[in-house]
């Protein structure tokens, strides 16, 4: 008899360090999958489907899952995790998941999967964290920028984004400039529980996407010319979009989130030294707040085909470190920010040159504002009387 669950044994066992990565990619395997879980031991995968499927479809799903596993796992080696700071043992007063209470109190309201409105409590908390990040930016005399939410498709193409992260793209489009198409849409557009029903040919060719990161806009602004003065520190906050399918389940993982970045462009030494100084300055700020976290080497969530090579490269050259805050309610950690070094990747691809003619190096420090607020609430609870004085003061501001 058909069942709504499929239990699979991967043809190659998934090593412990890849269990999370493989699990997150299973979200993109097939629309029939409602949830997917990889056993911690790496030798069993459970797929929960929206409805029972016939044997043929089950076989097709299994084949796709096996393909993900073999592509990501075969030939992968365990990266050495480098820990730059470890403050996970800081004592924090709360152990409860803040989500149910935040929803019940109306402190947040869910518009759709991965899309939330934030009320005054979270807004003030985020403003407080933002002020700390802006102070960090000021300490580097970083110049302020404002970037659009849309990003042209041809920009992302120039930096290989379509190949590296196709799964998380969000496309922006509009109706074709065609009277009949617009009239038809106006009269027939209706939503059902899956979304808006309208013929796909109503839409124009995609010229822009919703931006997945902030710093890319700066690199595009600097493209195809020499970098004035040979170095630049800049800062901006912006809306970012990463479609994370069934992984979009709480404030932890959003489709639409906001990021504050401090960005460095210049020589290799300039970028690496500033990235390290930023980390040290943040250490003081996090200590004042009392946040339990650690900073460790990491890799970006590259899509299946690119994953193994790119993740190994990032790890070998120590290109990415994440600030992982403790989530006591699930005994795990959540990346609330990252320290990134891109070598001369953007300088080369976008033709940003230093005074000696060589391509510029870039790096950024990026903070996820919703996540830092969420992790803080997970550690300190919703009642401000249990919060560190510095943060409590921000609520009355
Ligand atoms: P990254 O550029 O991937 O290192 O992202 C920088 C920061 O943005 C992460 O450390 C998170 O805090 C935040 N972030 C990334 N993806 C999401 C998401 N889907 N939802 C919420 N925050 C996110
Ligand atoms: Zn960045």
Image (cartoon, rainbow, N blue to C red):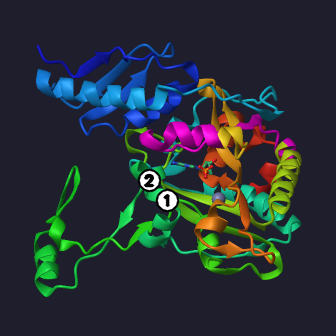
Q: Looking at the image, which residue is at 68% across and 48% down?
A: 337
Front residue of 291 and 174: 174
Asked whether, in this view, residue 182 is left or right of residue 298, the answer is: left
Q: Which residue is mark 1?
A: 160
Classify 100 as above or below 47. below
- Residue behind label 2 places its C-beta within 8 angstroms of ligand 1: no
Across and down, in percent, residue 180 comes to 10, 83
Which residue of the protein is positioned furthest toward the front in this rendering? 357
**Spatial CA span between label 2 and label 1:** 6 Å
Please say whether residue 293 is one of the residues in the magenta stretch: yes
- Left or right: residue 83 versus residue 255 is right
Q: Is residue 332 above or below residue 369?
A: above
Contact flag, marks 2 and 1 (Cβ < 8 Å): yes
Q: Residue at x 44, y 53 (%)?
A: 163
Residue at which label 2 appears:
163
- Work out whether 62 lies above or below 354: above
- Please tell me which residue lies in front, 141 or 133: 141
Q: Residue at x 40, y 26 (%)?
A: 70
What residue is shown at x 74% (from left), y 70% (from top)?
358
Q: Is residue 259 above or below residue 26?
A: below
Q: Is residue 202 visible?
A: yes
Instruction: Specify whether residue 143 is painted magenta.
Output: no
Per the image, label 1 sits on a secondary structure element best described as: loop
Q: Which residues are magenta?
A: 287-313
Whether the residue carrying mark 1 lies under 8 Å from ligand 2 is answered with: no
Expressed as whole percent of the image width and height from the top left, the position of residue 317 reads 72, 43
Residue 284 lies left or right of residue 318; in this view the side is right
Q: Residues within 10 Å of mark 2 (few under 14, many from 20)?
A: some
Position of residue 353 measured from the top left corner of the image (x, y, whole percent):
71, 75
Q: Quadrant of the C terminus?
A: bottom right
Residue 248 in view of the camera = no
Tell me the quarter of the picture where residue 278 sits.
bottom right
């Amino acid at each position: 008899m058909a069942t709504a669950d499929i239990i699979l044994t991967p043809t190659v066992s998934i090593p412990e360090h890849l269990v999370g990565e493989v699990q997150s990619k299973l979200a993109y395997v097939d629309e029939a999958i409602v949830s997917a879980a990889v056993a911690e031991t790496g030798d069993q995968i459970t797929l929960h489907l929206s409805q029972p499927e016939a044997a043929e479809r089950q076989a097709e799903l299994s084949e796709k899952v096996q393909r993900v596993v073999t592509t990501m796992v075969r030939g992968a080696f365990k990266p050495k995790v480098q820990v730059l700071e470890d403050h996970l043992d800081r004592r924090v007063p709360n152990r409860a998941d803040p989500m149910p209470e935040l929803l019940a109190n109306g402190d947040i309201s869910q518009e759709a999967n991965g899309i939330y409105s934030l009320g005054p409590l979270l807004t003030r908390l985020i403003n407080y964290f933002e002020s700390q990040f802006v102070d960090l930016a000021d300490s580097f005399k970083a110049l302020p920028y404002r970037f659009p939410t849309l990003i042209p498709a041809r920009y992302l193409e120039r930096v290989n984004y379509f190949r590296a992260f196709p799964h998380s793209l969000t496309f922006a489009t509009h109706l074709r400039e065609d009277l009949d198409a617009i009239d038809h849409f106006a009269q027939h557009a209706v939503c059902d529980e899956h979304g808006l029903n309208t013929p796909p040919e109503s839409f124009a060719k995609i010229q822009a996407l919703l931006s997945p990161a902030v710093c890319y806009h700066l690199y595009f602004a600097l493209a195809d010319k020499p970098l004035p003065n040979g170095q630049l520190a800049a800062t901006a906050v912006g809306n970012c979009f990463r479609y994370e399918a069934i992984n979009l389940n709480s404030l932890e993982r959003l489709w639409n989130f906001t990021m504050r970045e401090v960005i460095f462009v210049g020589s290799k030494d300039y970028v690496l030294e500033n990235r390290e100084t930023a980390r040290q300055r943040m250490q003081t700020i996090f200590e004042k707040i009392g946040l339990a976290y650690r900073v460790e080497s990491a890799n970006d969530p590259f899509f299946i085909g690119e994953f193994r090579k790119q993740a190994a490269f990032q790890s070998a050259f120590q290109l990415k470190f994440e600030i992982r805050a403790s989530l006591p309610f699930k005994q795990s950690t959540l990346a609330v920010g990252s320290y990134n070094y891109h070598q001369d990747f953007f300088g080369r691809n976008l033709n940003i040159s230093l005074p000696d003619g060589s391509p510029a190096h870039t790096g950024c420090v990026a903070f996820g504002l919703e996540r830092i607020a969420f992790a803080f609430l997970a550690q300190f609870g919703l009642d401000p009387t249990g919060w560190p004085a510095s943060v409590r003061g921000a609520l009355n501001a």
